[in-house]
Amino acid sequence: MPRYADEPRLTAGEKTEVAYYVARMAKRGIAGEHVYQGDLERKVERVIDRARKREERDAKKNSAGK
């Protein structure tokens, strides 16, 4: 279950992608406090946005079929 109401449920592939990006952020964090991580943060946001769109699409499909 999502932590917050606006968080989408992630598929196994999406969870894997997010975990990979978070691990890369942690590795960069070890390199130093001033290392740029904005690119990885944007990638995580894109995965979450894609999951939101998928949920909306599935909800519309399920409501139309009933």
Image: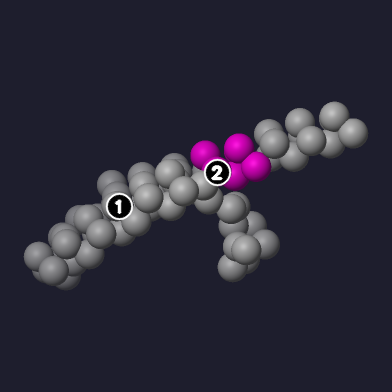
Asked if residue 50 lies left or right of residue 13, the reply is right
> Relative to 65, does residue 28 appear above or below in the rendering?
below
Residue lying at 65% horizontally and 42% vertically, measured from the top left: 55
Q: Residues within 10 Å of mark 2 (few under 14, many from 20)?
A: some
Q: Earlier in the sequence, mark 1 or mark 2?
A: 1
Looking at the picture, which amino acid does disc 2 mark? Ala
Asked if residue 65 lies left or right of residue 61, the reply is right
Q: Describe the element under mark 1 as helix, strand or loop.
A: helix
The part of the chain drawn in magenta is: 50-55
Residue lying at 28% horizontally and 47% vertically, measured from the top left: 39
Residue lying at 29% horizontally and 52% vertically, measured from the top left: 20
* Gap between marks 1 and 2 measured at Cα: 16 Å
Name which quarter of the figure residue 31 lies in.
Answer: bottom left
In the displayed image of the protein, which residue is found farthest to the left? Answer: 31
> Is residue 4 magenta-colored?
no
> Is residue 53 magenta-colored?
yes
The residue closer to the viewer here, 27 or 63, is 63
Q: At which x and y percent is residue 29?
A: 18, 66
Q: How many marks?
A: 2
Q: At which x and y percent is residue 14?
A: 44, 46
The residue closer to the viewer here, 25 or 15, is 15
Residue lying at 25% horizontally and 59% vertically, measured from the top left: 23
**Colour mapping:** one colour
Q: Describe the element under mark 2 as helix, strand or loop.
A: helix
**What is the quadrant of the C terminus in the image?**
top right
Asked if residue 44 lies left or right of residue 48, the reply is left
The residue closer to the viewer here, 3 or 43, is 3
**What is the quadrant of the N terminus in the image?**
bottom right
The residue identified by callout 2 is 51
> Relative to 14, does residue 28 appear above or below in the rendering?
below
The residue identified by callout 1 is 21
- The answer to whether one can see residue 60 in this image is yes
